[in-house]
Image: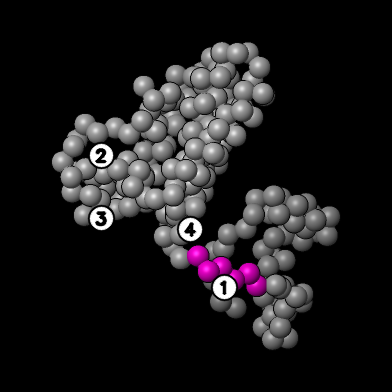
Amino acid sequence: MTTTQANFRIDADIKDQAEQTFILLGVTPSQAVNHFYQYVAEKGRLPFSVQTTVTLENDEDIYLRLLREIRICNMHLRYAELLSEKGDKPASLNKALSLAKSEASRAYDTLDEHMSSVAQYAHSLQEFGANHETGGVDQFLVQLRDRLWNIRLCPASDSTQIVSMHRDLYTSALILTFSHPTECDEDILECPHYVPDSYMVGGQ
């Protein structure tokens, strides 16, 4: 019998729960998957019903939605740092999240601000896109969003590290998402020192 390798993605929590069940049943994940494929091949149907979810989002919509979430994280960090001096961290973070969502909603009424942020790194776009393998821009953005949400939980004493990390991550997302500098406004590209206030913590 000739075997082949199958690659697929699965939610980490579901995977852990399923593998615990496999242990109780005395089978390995490979055996379980092989039995599943054999059933489908022999019966010509699935052993369960599946409700297919159809999305009308195109790639650009997906990227922008993820960037919008990243932007909220970015603003959340910005406000959280400003409010952390008050000493009440949970309340400060809640306040930060509320302010971030409100500002992010306004910022994404148009793409102007976003494209301006991308433009300042236009000289690095092609090189970064060519050398950075991510398994897909959408997957990279999902990972980036999750990392930002984890960073926000760092203690206030690490604020310098938080600022540095979230700037690097946010910049990477901007660079990787739009890999064609010609899409940016030429006037903005001629301003190498342009840095939007939204990119700076506290607008500094």
| Position above or below: 51 against 98 | below
Residue drawn at (41%, 60%), measured in percent from left and top?
A: 60
Q: Residues within 10 Å of mark 3 (few under 14, many from 20)?
A: few
Residue 14: image x %, image y %?
A: 71, 54
Residue 183: image x %, image y %?
A: 25, 55
Residue to which mark 2 is pinned = 120
Is residue 35 one of those drawn in magenta? Answer: no
- Dot 3 and dot 1 residues touching (CB under 8 Å): no
Amino acid of disc 1: Thr
- Dot 3 and dot 4 residues touching (CB under 8 Å): no
Q: Residues within 10 Å of mark 4 (few under 14, many from 20)?
A: some
Helix or strand or loop: what does disc 3 sit on?
helix
* Cα–Cα span, label 4 and label 1: 36 Å
* Cα–Cα span, label 2 and label 1: 50 Å
Residue drawn at (66%, 17%), measured in percent from left and top?
A: 88
Residue to which mark 3 is pinned = 183
**In front: mark 4 or mark 1?**
4
Q: Assign the magenta stretch its main secondary structure.
A: loop
Residue 36: image x %, image y %?
A: 71, 73
Residue to which mark 1 is pinned = 3
In the image, 139 versus 47, the foreground residue is: 139
Instruction: Write down the region rendered in magenta.
Output: 52-57
Residue 159: image x %, image y %?
A: 49, 19
- Dot 4 and dot 1 residues touching (CB under 8 Å): no
* Cα–Cα span, label 3 and label 2: 13 Å
**In front: mark 2 or mark 1?**
2
Q: Earlier in the sequence, mark 4 or mark 1?
A: 1
Amino acid of disc 3: Glu
Residue to which mark 4 is pinned = 62
